[in-house]
């Protein structure tokens, strides 16, 4: 089983709880890492940084940049500018990783949108590197191809990442998004030192909802431990982030959610 | 645009309508092909065959065989026996194609289940060949990996098919299941003479439901015409089957549904 010292609690797993509430619950349950979202950071990054520092927590990543494809040049530039802000925010809260959810196509042209992702990363990567922030491409499950990400497989993410330096651009491997892929173990091996993050949750059956239907580790069908061993064999030794979007989970207190997260992490990761 | 003479109406697109109702509506709207489901055929295949023959319709395929993986040897054998019945039914209604939806894993072991699919096809292919029935592997969208099919990409379906003779085992290419795949055009080219069927519908945004959320051609984001040209470039010239699971569509009469299908086929396929 994975060591508890590697557990990172993604803020979204506690739904609408504030960053302060989540941080306090992490400390209470011995969780050492936290993964904040920009909506808790952007308005005042130094205050968010102070809050996390005061709690004694480490930051595994900031969610999220990306969303590069857009119909007009002006809008694409606006998205790039927003990513530059996200890079600043990541640096401000003391993480070296910005997670990229790359966005849908503005029309039916998937290939065109995929090129916009490459161009968008290319437009921000030097700045990110100077700020000490790596860019983690997160391939999303193909069911999100139309509304959240034209990047949908590990193979595709590896190909995009390979266009940049391995120190600057890599992959966020989330079991929920990639477990179904017949090529997943091959592509994890190929990603090697480009694996920048490892996220866990579970795929429950029947699946209650596209976005909000993720399960706690052990409640579903994903071979989580096998995937964890595969990313470790590929060289990844960093934090393991628990990211679960689920309304019935969110109905509970941060304390209850984190307590359950710790126990499922011990048993199923 | 595709010729209307290639349009095949999959029975399920008219929801719970009987085979007789669907056949009559096809004839009324000049549709020459029909794709029945086993629930309308199994009980009395020769009566179904007679009904279709009397209507003057051709049969593009029978849905569906497959569902090979199971926890015990006995249950796997029961599935194989059921596929032998399905092959008989396909032959009885005068089609040379049985569509295979290959089933989920009985546990968390995807690789094991994928091997059961290969073994299952291997157990029935000779019989199918003697009956003049080809087996069409339909890769389903990865969102169905846990509950309907461990075969989820064109690449994977191509690899399984390649273990058998090209005259016996090939692919059912359904745009709804494969449009998101960065490798889709490469894999269509690779499939070549193994493309046994081409199914159309559309991916609507936001998607109302996993299973029941398919849209009519033109209502969504899939590059249908481009995919149709790709399967044609690969050599496919057969019927184009419209298969849509959608409750709001099903609330309408077969006549209304087929009329709309013909018009969307003319405009968007």
Image (tube, coloured by chain):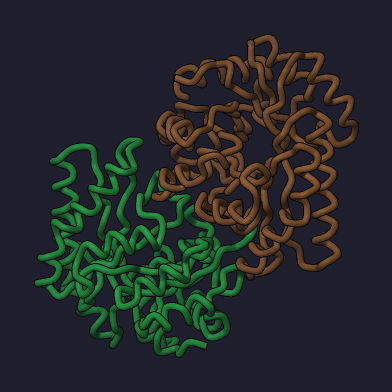
Chain colours: A brown, B green
Q: Position of residue B137 (x, y in %)?
A: 30, 63
Residue B39 seen anywhere in this rendered image of the structure: no
Q: Residue at x 80, y 18 (%)?
A: A53
Q: Nearer the viewer, residue B86 or B141?
A: B141
Q: Residue at x 55, y 36 (%)?
A: A214
Q: Is residue A194 left or right of residue B193?
A: right
Q: Nearer the viewer, residue A176 or B93?
A: A176
Q: Position of residue A252 (x, y in %)?
A: 65, 21
All told, the count of numbered labels is 0
Q: Residue at x 75, y 43 (%)?
A: A129
Q: Is residue A137 left or right of residue B86?
A: right
Q: Position of residue B228 (x, y in %)?
A: 47, 79
Placement of A139 over or under B181, stated as above or below:
above
Q: Is residue A238 left or right of residue B34?
A: right
Placement of A16 over or under A101, stated as above or below:
above
Q: Position of residue A133 (x, y in %)?
A: 74, 38
């Amino acid at each position: 089983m994975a060591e508890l010292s590697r557990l990172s609690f993604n803020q979204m797993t506690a739904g609408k709880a504030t960053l302060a509430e989540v941080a306090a619950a992490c400390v209470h349950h011995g969780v050492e890492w936290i993964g904040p979202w920009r909506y808790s950071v952007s308005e005042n990054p130094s205050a968010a940084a102070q809050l996390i520092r005061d709690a004694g927590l480490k930051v595994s990543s900031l969610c999220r940049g990306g969303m590069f494809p857009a119909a007009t040049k002006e809008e694409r530039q606006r998205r790039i500018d927003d990513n530059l802000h996200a890079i600043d925010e990541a640096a401000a809260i003391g993480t070296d990783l910005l997670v990229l959810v790359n966005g849908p196509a503005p029309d039916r042209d998937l290939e065109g949108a995929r090129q916009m992702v490459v161009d968008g990363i290319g437009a921000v990567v030097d700045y990110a590197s100077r700020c000490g922030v790596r860019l983690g491409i997160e391939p999303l499950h193909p069911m999100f191809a139309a509304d959240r990400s034209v990047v949908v497989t590990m193979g595709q993410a590896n190909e995009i990442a390979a266009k940049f330096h391995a120190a600057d651009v890599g992959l966020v491997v989330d079991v929920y998004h990639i477990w179904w892929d017949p090529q997943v173990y091959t592509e994890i091996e190929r990603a090697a030192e480009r694996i920048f993050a490892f996220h866990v949750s579970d795929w429950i059956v029947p699946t209650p909802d596209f976005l909000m239907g993720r399960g706690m580790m052990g409640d579903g069908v994903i071979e989580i431990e096998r995937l964890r061993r595969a990313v470790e064999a590929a060289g990844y030794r960093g934090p393991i982030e628990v990211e679960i979007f689920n309304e019935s989970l969110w109905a509970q207190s941060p304390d209850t959610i984190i307590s359950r997260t710790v126990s499922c992490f011990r048993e199923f990761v």
